[in-house]
């Protein structure tokens, strides 16, 4: 139960490698993947966690190995949060920048395509903001957390 099959430092190294790999690959898939989980995205995350389990624990299912992995993942996650809070450059690199999807009623089709956001997803956010037409949107912004914030144009006098 407590006797590790691998040296303790190997679990830490494995956890750091897998964390880094997942961070980079999920960051490359775009903000929408993290902020607005569809059922497919949720299933993907579950399968990813199962897929990387053995690469982290090297087949060692002891309690000690689990504790080391959990402590390592929590520590590196805390460090990444601190780093993005402390450094604007790290925040931009890791979290990205907000992207303008609609400006003064004009859709930015290239930005929608690059962020892989469908018109249906955009319109759902527009409707949720109480606006029925994109032409009535002053700005729609894809935030770094994956949420789309919509600000309506002021009503005509």
Image (cartoon, helix red, strand yellow):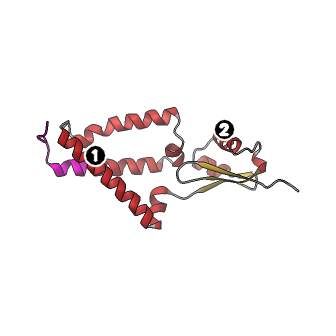
Q: Position of residue 107 (x, y in %)?
A: 71, 50
The question of residue 87 being in magenta is answered with no
Residue assigned mark 2: 120
Residue occupying the point 48% across, 46% down: 29
Q: How far from the left and from the top, in percent, is residue 96?
A: 51, 57
Of 37 and 52, nearer the camera is: 37
Label 1, on which residue?
70
Mark 2: secondary structure: helix
At which x and y percent is residue 59? 20, 36
Around disc 2, counting alpha carbons within 10 Å, would you say few (fewer than 14), some (14 to 19), or many (20 or more)? few
For the record, the magenta segment spans 1-16
Q: Quadrant of residue 130?
A: top right
User: Which residue shows up at 46% across the image and 35% down it?
Assistant: 42
Q: Quadrant of the N terminus?
A: top left
Instruction: Residue at 16% x, 49% y: name it.
Output: 8
| 97 up-or-down from 148: above or below | below
Query: Residue 155, percent across and down?
Result: 83, 53
Identified at 61% across, 48% down, the residue is: 148
Find out whether the residues at labels 2 and 1 contact each other: C-beta distance under 8 Å.
Answer: no
Q: Earlier in the sequence, mark 2 or mark 1?
A: 1
Q: Name the side, left or right, on which 35 lies relative to 85.
A: right
């Amino acid at each position: 139960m407590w006797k590790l099959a691998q040296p303790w430092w190997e679990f830490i190294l494995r956890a750091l490698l897998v964390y880094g790999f997942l961070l980079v690959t999920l960051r490359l898939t775009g903000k929408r993947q993290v902020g607005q989980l569809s059922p497919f995205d949720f299933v993907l995350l579950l399968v990813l966690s199962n897929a990387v389990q053995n690469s982290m624990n090297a087949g060692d299912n002891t309690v000690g190995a689990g504790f080391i992995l959990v402590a390592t993942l929590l520590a590196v996650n805390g460090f990444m949060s601190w780093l993005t809070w402390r450094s604007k450059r790290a925040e931009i690199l890791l979290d990205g920048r907000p992207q303008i999807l609609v400006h003064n009623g004009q859709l930015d089709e290239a930005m929608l395509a690059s962020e892989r956001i469908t018109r249906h997803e955009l319109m759902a956010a527009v409707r949720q903001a109480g606006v029925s037409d994109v032409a009535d949107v002053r700005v729609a912004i894809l935030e770094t957390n994956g949420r789309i914030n919509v600000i309506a144009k002021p009503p005509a006098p």
